[in-house]
Amino acid sequence: MKKTWLLGFGFFSISITWALYNAFVPFFLEKFLTSTALIGFMMTIDNYFALFLQPWIGSRSDRTNSRLGKRMPYLLIGMPLAALFGALIPWHTSLLTLVLFMVLMNLSMSLYRSPTVALMPDITKDSKRTQANGIINFMGGIGSIIAFSGGSLLYEKHASLPFLTTSVLTLICLVILLGTIKEKRDAIAYAPEEEKPKISFKGQWNRPTIFLLGAIFFWFLSYQGVEAFFTLYGTNHLHLTEGQSAFSLAFFSLAFVLAAIPSGLLGNRFGKKRIIAIGVVGLIAIFAAISFVDALLPLRALLLLGGICWAMININSYPFIVALGDEQSIGTRTGIYYLISSLAAIASPPLMGGLIDLLGYSVLFYFSSGGMVIALLFLLGIRDRGLPRAIAAQNGSTNI
């Protein structure tokens, strides 16, 4: 558990960077672009890299064998580069330089995101992975809270301050990880996969995997639309200030942090599918309710409840996907998990932006609620009898 908490600093750096990026970069783009759909498209740059790079990087890290281990070399390269280009974003002088810095930062993030996530199952026993995922996401949620709350205060003083602060924190996190996580010492079974010519999932596809990936796509389709446009929704639809709009997301992140570890424990006790389903149903109702809210206090109250439901979903879904494969494919499955979530994130902002252009910002949460309904249907298609035998056997104890 000590190593898991330390590994959480990697998730802290990823979460604080993405939260800050999604909260404030739309304001930069809005100065150059009038189309909400085009802003949404620009916000998907990171997901194009995730689509092509993260599955390959994840699979490649499975087969890497260096002095630092399988995953750490990717962190050592990607994190400093992401810190550098992230700090440069607010210093853009035109749309061209803004997009250039965005692309370079997202490319750098893609180098280490999958290896960072894959470190958790590397150093954690299967029976403890759901709780461990709760711990590292707790740390990630702390990063989001700092980004939305502290970042909004720094942004009002100068647009560059939150980005510079985040870059410094990313470098500090890298030092902590390099000093405390020794893969060849801490991994349960350090054994790099043999070289393969391409990513292979032969023999690993099954009905639960396919249906779970379908559910993951649609709940990320809903979530990414909200994440990309919430600050603009707050300023343009609810007439909040930029700081108020960004700070409101801190309530969502706060609830996520508080619910992260309990969600992992509940998933382990009652079954991941059941806890995920409760979270999905909750977000269907909450997103629908937000559509009728026009005051700050009830909005933030609903965001608190939404954060709890999102924790139930997000904490349990990644360990579920990993459990459906073998130990040698952890990095590859991590990449596929991000491939599907990235496909959703690519589709959601442009689609949502186009609908906003046509129907106004009020459509945001109707769309998100509908996406969660489809995710629930996919989730209900997962039957215990379709699970691999070893996992189905756990259903009576650790529960999947």
Image (cartoon, rainbow, N blue to C red):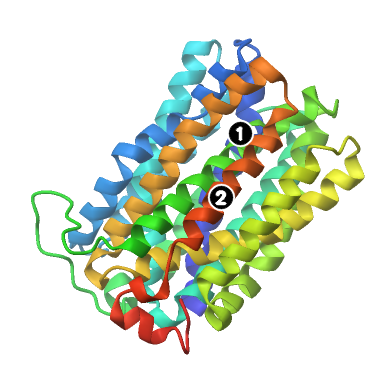
Give the amino acid at mark 1: Ala
Q: Earlier in the sequence, mark 2 or mark 1?
A: 2
Mark 2 neighbour class, 10 Å CA radius: few under 14, some 14 to 19, many 20 or more = many
In the image, is residue 271 above or below residue 31?
below
Residue 329: x %, y % from top left: 25, 64
Of residues 223 and 173, the one nearer the viewer is 223
Residue 15 disc label: 2
Residue 311 relative to residue 4: left or right: right
- Any part of residue 16 in sight: no
Residue at mark 1: 228
If the image is split into quadrants, where does the C terminus sit?
bottom left
Residue visible at 47% across and 55% down in the picture: 378
Give me the C-alpha separation between circle 2 and circle 1: 14 Å
Of residues 176 and 108, the one nearer the viewer is 108
Which type of secondary structure does the marked residue at label 1 adopt?
helix
- Any part of residue 370 in sight: yes
Give the amino acid at mark 2: Ser
Residue 321: x %, y % from top left: 39, 63
Residue 234: x %, y % from top left: 78, 31
Residue 139 relative to residue 72: left or right: right
